[in-house]
Image (cartoon, rainbow, N blue to C red):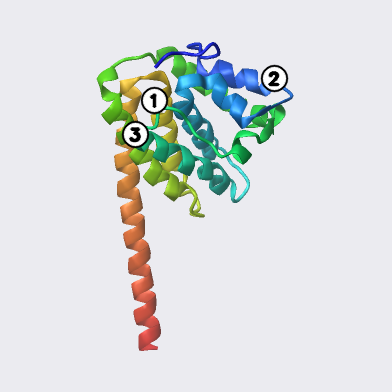
Amino acid sequence: MPQGPTDRQEPISEILREFGARESLSVGEIVDRFGHRAFGALMFVFAIPNLLPLPPGSSTLLGAPLLLLSPQVALGIATLWLPKAVDDRRIAGADLAKVFDRLLPSVERIEKVSRPRLTFLFGPVGDRVIGVICSLLSFVLILPIPLGNLLPALTIGVLGFALFQRDGLFALVGYGLAAVSGAVLFVAADLVIDGVRHLVNWFGAA
């Protein structure tokens, strides 16, 4: 895909620092700045803050955009589409800086060891697999589960970063995290169902 004039291969950390230094910017401006890598970048941007201690309900607010982004990757859509109300919404640079300043040192260390590699894992099929996984985990992310959003958020963040960087090694790490997330969610769901069954039997015997 051809690159636009604003689509330079800069590290995601550098672009996020640029956003934080601005007074405000619209979501559409953020998308344009990331260019053809907007899908992976925005998946990373909306997922990773969930690893920080945030006010209750934040994971739902951050997960909602992922429900819009990830299915587009799964469907193989080349150009990111956002509703006009979302596209025009403005965000204060100070708010972005407040969230990402705590994360950027770690991101910068990761960027030093990340590069395009194992690129056969991407493309029409690989990108869609990432989109499907992230779509499923986005549904989990918006649920009000105490600490239940950490592993899904990390998985989406890693896969989004891999998509952004075209780094197949990070994609493999993301797939591993996805498998662990699925196993943990399965066990958790089984425990909840088992607990509900015991409660029903207890009340029935009372």
Quadrant in the picture for the N terminus: top left
**Quarter of the image where one finds residue 112:** top left
Residue linked to disc 2: 21
- Would you place residue 68 above or below residue 36 in this image? below
Residue linked to disc 1: 163
Residue type indicated by callout 2: Ala
Sort mark 3 into few (<14), some (14-19) or many (20+) by Cα contacts within 10 Å: many
- Would you place residue 107 above or below residue 157 in this image? above
Write the residue at 34% across / 49% down: 184
Describe residue 181's horizontal placement relative to residue 68 as left or right: left
Describe residue 94's horizontal placement relative to residue 43 as left or right: right
- For marks 2 and 1, give the CA distance: 25 Å
Q: How many circles with numbers are drawn on the protein?
A: 3
* x, y percent for residue 153: 45, 39
Circle 1/circle 3 CB separation < 8 Å = yes
Q: Which mark is residue 131?
A: none
Any part of residue 172 in sight = no
Q: Nearer the viewer, residue 46 or 198?
A: 46
Q: Earlier in the sequence, mark 2 or mark 3?
A: 2
Sort mark 2 into few (<14), some (14-19) or many (20+) by Cα contacts within 10 Å: some
Any part of residue 116 in sight = yes
- Would you place residue 76 above or below residue 196 in this image? above
Q: Which mark is residue 130?
A: 3
Identify the element where label 2 is drawn.
helix
Q: Nearer the viewer, mark 2 or mark 3?
A: 3
* x, y percent for residue 67: 46, 44
Identify the element where label 1 is drawn.
helix
Write the residue at 34% across / 62% down: 191
- For marks 1 and 3, give the CA distance: 8 Å
* x, y percent for residue 148: 45, 49
